Image (spheres, rainbow, N blue to C red):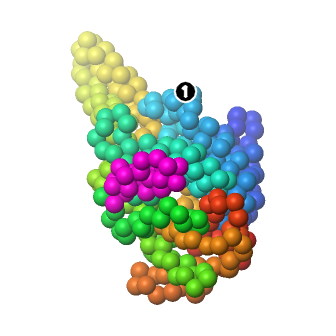
Amino acid sequence: MPLFFTGCVTQTRVVHLTGNIMVDGPNAITNGPPQDKVLWQYRTAAAAMRRGQFDYAKQLLDDALLTTGGISTDKSARLARSYFHPESRKTFIGEPYERVMAYYYRGILYWMDGEPDNARACFRSAAIQDADTDNHEYAADYVLLDYLDGLASAKLAGDAADAFKRADQEARLAKPPRVDVKANVLCFVECGMGPYKYATGRYREELRFGVQPSPAASAEIEVDGQRISAAPCDDLYFQATTRGGRVMDHVLGNKAAFKTTTDVVGKTAIIGGAVAASQRDRTSQEVGLGLIAAGLVSEIISGATTPAADLRAWTNLPRYLSFASLSLAPGAHVAKIEFLDQAGHVLPNLTKTITINVPADGKDKVVYISDKSTTPQTV
């Protein structure tokens, strides 16, 4: 299907969507509207990781995070915060859970490259995206962000006690796995379909989140006679709909209230002006015409106000995030990853086969596994 992008009045660019993210993503990044570039970088990076194209994913995430890091001075963001510019016109950086995932993925890739210190920095940056750093009303509550912060610190001979304690306290689904600093194979596992966005309210100003049923809810990794569970530690739907565990109403209240107020004032002025203008004396007629004019101006302002929520979304995120670690001798090992439903039954169509090449230099081997990963893979 074609996707139309309007630049100036005299020129319309068309980006044809094929349905293949590895075609559509690069095309939209290069030829689509600038305010959607980060969105397509997010989507394409996730797809690249599932295909084992980790260098490409790094390139996309680095550029996206460079943009989001400087977003406070972006002109389109300032315009979108005004009453008369739609939210969808601003440069996309995503809701907190989307920004968290950009840092989370980049952290995985840093660890994959043998840089646990930079990975830890990414997990901490992700936690900041989830926290209210301005009003301090709530703190980040991703189990894996704190757990991985602690694990990286422990492997770097740092103090990890507080991070592990937070991870254990935040657990709502499965408890994080037992800490094994000597484990040399780290498995980042994800499955399910992440949240989608929709709008409610008189002006479609209320941003809401829904989620599709997820067949897969957990995974098990079998390699060299070991069978390791990768139970879900974090749920992105929960994270999208809460902050610090508290359910949130996502409403663009200021814009909606302004639009309602100017609409009511305008209609009231027009009606009152019409009544006054119908009087016989000249003064009342002049007052009435003035009220009608003021009412029309207010109605124009109300019509120009655009409170509709921004429904652009990182559509190929997972729902559940899991982690498992194990120890393997240097060399190649064939691993089978089975995904399980809510009742613990294996979903055969989702089974993955991965050849894990464990280095002999003692560095950690990082494995990323999605229920949408291509198979077989060699990592």
**Quarter of the C terminus within the rendering:** bottom right
Q: Is residue 16 magenta?
A: no
In the rendered image of this protein, does residue 148 appear above or below residue 124? below
In screen coordinates, is 9 left or right of 120? right
Q: Is residue 160 magenta?
A: yes
In screen coordinates, is 42 left or right of 357? left
Residue found 64% across the figure and 79% down from its top: 335
Q: Which residues are magenta?
A: 146-168
Regarding mark 1 in the picture, which secondary structure is present there? helix
- Type of amino acid under label 1: Thr
Location of residue 20 (image quadrant):
bottom right
Residue found 62% across the figure and 37% down from its top: 66
Which secondary structure dominates the residues rendered in magenta? helix
Image position, residue 57 (x, y; %): 68, 54
- Comparing 94 with 28, the one in front is 94
**Quarter of the N terminus within the rendering:** bottom right
In the rendered image of this protein, does residue 276 appear above or below residue 194? above
Residue located beneath label 1 in the image: 73
Residue found 46% across the figure and 32% down from its top: 81
Residue found 37% across the figure and 70% down from its top: 174
The answer to whether residue 47 shows anywhere in this view is no
Image position, residue 79 (x, y; %): 51, 30
Location of residue 129 (image quadrant):
top left
- Comparing 215 with 206, the one in front is 215
In the rendered image of this protein, does residue 265 appear above or below residue 28? above
